[in-house]
Amino acid sequence: MSSIVFVNPWQYSEKEVISRVWPPLSLANCAALLRKHNFKVSIIDANAEQLKPEEVSERVRLSNAKKVFITSTPIDRWQCPYIDLSPFIECVKSVKAACKNTKTELYVMGTHGTVEPKRVLEITKADAVIIGEPELTVLEICEMESLENIDGVCYKADGKISIKRKNTLLDLNELPLPAFDLLPMKKYFYELLGKDFTLIEASRGCPFNCIFCLKKMYGSGYRKKPVEKSIKELEYAMKSGVKNVYFIDLEFTVDRSLVVELCDFLVKKRKEGHGLNWCCQTRADTVDRELLQKMHDAGCKLVHFGVESESHRMIKIMNKGASLDRIEEGVKAAMSVGIEAACFFMFGLPTETKSERKETIEFAKKLNPTYASFHVAIPYTGTVFGNACDAHSTNGKKFFPLCDPSRNYDELRSIAKKAYLQFYLRPSYVITVLRRNPRLFTKQLKLFLRYMR
């Protein structure tokens, strides 16, 4: 019996960012939905198993696959996709070559194909590129004979490329429990939480409109699962041996009632001896001490905050819609209740001055979060920032533009590295961390060294 195979390529040659070994939740969602409709499915997570393209293609060949779906970005990279597309391209080409004498169909999906479907179709020579969130489109491709009646695809027919975007968004309540049983769950970890790790998605999208944020995969607006469904997924994850969870929602605390109900459930489980450690990402101006205390009691160990800049002018240009006072209050409130804070800062947005970059570094020191991460702002195609940049790479390797005439990427990267040095090598910081938690210092040192590569 032929099968449907999903592939997450190994990001072995990624140079620009850290490639984490996190479960490809979007593929687990797609596989679960197909299985619900009686398809035979499997997932090859080459990133977790460190499989080279030829090893992936051999597995695909042996699977007698009818259709193969390869992602350039699993859900944790929808918003911040890989700059270097070569591992994905090599994987696609290898699978295509291995299946050239069969009737196997090859489809690609992810952020890259969503923002530039025609280009990705030309690069990969796939049967079609899936545009936007993949779940419904994957199901339709597997159920229908022709692509003509399917939205959310880009394909070539009679020598012409057809691009059909999807207007209907997925009802998150329709998703079955993720197919964790098809993944090598013991291989996943997050260095700031630990092993026995997975992702949980309680909502999709974000109501805010920062100019640098790439949200094309999510569609417009904000959707959430019924809290009962998220609770079932958490219970399922715990039964699967999961002890550490990252809520991969773009803004976890936007819906306060959702967070409160999830925390109530998690507090109850902790009292029963089945607690989870978890983290999330959110805006610092959507939390307060009361909510954070509840999150802490429910097992929240870490919150990721996008701070971005110290400059009021830059915050306004970003269209972030947050005050620095509220950001500072949120970060300090989290740490005061015992939650670790990871703050993210960026350099290189339009018109930013050298003095503003220095002020951002000083603001990071003032906030003094548990972790600070400094990045060069990437003008992703499909964002307001990206659309304002004219320079695009055309060599198929660096997919998104790194700079325009007003931005020197190497200089900005150097500033980011200096920021790491200034933040993490402060004697007061090192002494504080060593006194509080020597093991935490070891984790931070490893992270620091990886970012400084």
Image (cartoon, rainbow, N blue to C red):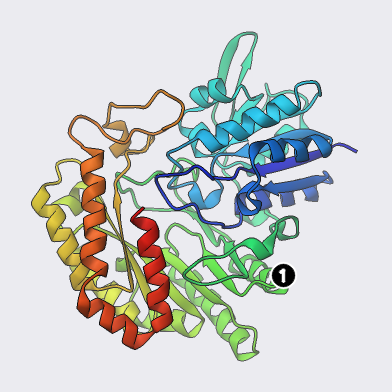
Furthest residue to the right? Answer: 1
For the N terminus, the image quarter is top right
Kindly identify the residue that appears in the image at 44 percent across and 47 percent down: 79
Q: Is residue 202 left or right of residue 126?
A: left
Kindly identify the residue that appears in the image at 33 percent across and 48 percent down: 209
Q: Count how many numbered circles sit on residues in the image.
A: 1
The residue carrying mark 1 is: 240
Q: Would you place residue 200 above or below residue 231 in this image?
A: above
Q: Would you place residue 191 above or below residue 121 in this image?
A: below
* Secondary structure category for the residue under label 1: loop
Residue 390 location (% of width, % of height)? 28, 26
Badge 1 crowding class, 10 Å Cα cut-off, few under 14, some 14 to 19, many 20 or more, is few
Residue 57 seen in the figure: yes
Which sits in the foreground, 401 or 160? Answer: 401
Q: Is residue 141 left or right of residue 65?
A: left
Residue 151 seen in the figure: no
Kindly identify the residue that appears in the image at 22 percent across and 45 percent down: 412
Q: Would you place residue 336 above or below residue 197 in this image?
A: below
Residue 288 location (% of width, % of height)? 33, 77
Which amino acid type is marked by label 1?
Answer: Ser
